[in-house]
Image (cartoon, rainbow, N blue to C red):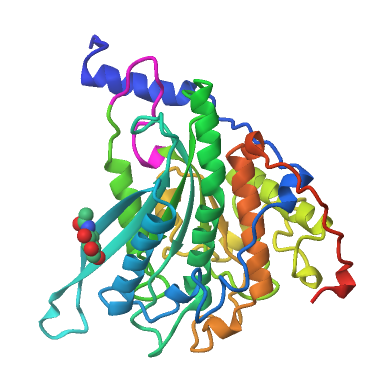
Amino acid sequence: MRLDKASPTGIALSLLLASFLAPSTFAYKPLSDNFLRQVPAASDTELDPVTGDLLAPFLQVRPPDSEGHADIQDHLVQFFARELPDWTVEWQNSTTYTSGKSQKGGKFVAHHRSNLVFRREPPWTRPGQANLLTLAAHYATPVTAPAGYLGATDAAVSCALLLHVARSLDKYAAQMYREMQELGEGGTVPMDMGLQIVFIDSGGLDDKDNTGAESLASTWEKTINPALPASLYGYPNRLNQISLLLLLDLLGGASPRVPSRYQTTHWAYQAMARVEARLRGLKLMDSESTGKFLPDSSSPVHQLGMASGWATDGDDHLPFMRRGVTVLPVVPDAKPEHAGTLKDDGKNVDRKTVRDWSRVLVGFALEWLDMMEVEPAAPARRRRRVPAANRA
Ligand SMILES: *[C@@H]1O[C@H](CO)[C@@H](O)[C@H](O)[C@H]1NC(C)=O
């Protein structure tokens, strides 16, 4: 068969080739100490379980099709419209059916799922051109949970952290994109980087339910991007645009230990662990006595953890991983003490630890997106450092 360049096959083939030939390494530049000192932490006020604008809205009973579930969707759409108007909003809705064996007549039961996706892409990129650091967490609580279950660590805190990352990165992204546009830059993999935040509608049946993630991954795999001119590279489908998927879950307990689970993302894990170590070295972490959150930077990858059943078919990252997306799960190796119980409410969230996660995640995202380009000036008057022993 002769491959005409203009034929659909020819175009698909050149797109495929382009995606192989495009440099796959990113300019990963560590932040300076000055920038690390200015990495914003989610504040105690923002994390207040009753009044905080980051955490409180998620702390409600929220299985699919419930009032709380719809309320969180409204909240997310409004939060971005109000505070982050440059981000695009996308719903990915689906209905799947299971046979209701327990029900009389064996009727099929419909499950509606709504994933919410917010994106900040470089303004010059065409659809399919930007590569996207993607952070995700699930927002529903299971219908099988005890009545009144608020699921703070499952996964309201993770959702709050996603909002914090989006809000913290936005102004730097705006500045970086503006400066690059003024210089006429863009059009290469390291320059066309954006950020994508996904609220996955999983976990609504039970804690093994990942129907939302499965629907999103399979839809994106089938969503073919429009062909770009030969002079531009592009990604064949929406799934290929994910440069790295950080999946957050079960965060909010004290002394978390997140192992490195996959060899393919061990280098990204190590980069995040270096951010944590440097923040600790600069005495910028609040949870000083608890040890490292990311302890495996020099030890081998915990493939054993997988073999012993850590990854179950119900985990949200697996539908993406099976389709070739590189995934770094930011999920502790043990469930927080109160996860799955009525005590998993906002009151038992360890706010120091959450503040520290917010610093680590923002620091990592800033490095990934090469934000040293827009490093803020050092504050004029340097604050005297308070010795660790004198801190609350
Ligand atoms: C998706 O479902 C939500 C309700 O869960 C609805 O508000 C929204 O309009 C739907 N969007 C699309 C594009 O179908």
The furthest residue to the left = 105
Quarter of the picture containing the N terminus is top left
Asked if residue 94 can be seen in this view, the reply is no
Residue shown at the point (43%, 52%) measured from the top left: 84
Q: Give the vertical position of 288 relative to 18 (above or below).
A: below
- Region in magenta: 227-240
Residue 234 belongs to magenta span: yes
Residue shown at the point (19%, 77%) measured from the top left: 100
Q: How many marks?
A: 0
Residue 338 belongs to magenta span: no
Q: Give the vertical position of 100 relative to 24 (above or below).
A: below
Asked if residue 205 can be seen in this view, the reply is yes
Quadrant in the rendering for residue 206 = bottom left
- In the image, 159 versus 371, the foreground residue is 371
**Relative image position of residue 325 (x, y in whole percent):** 46, 44
The furthest residue to the front = 380
Tell me which image quadrant ligand 1 sits in.
bottom left
**Relative image position of residue 183 (x, y in whole percent):** 53, 21
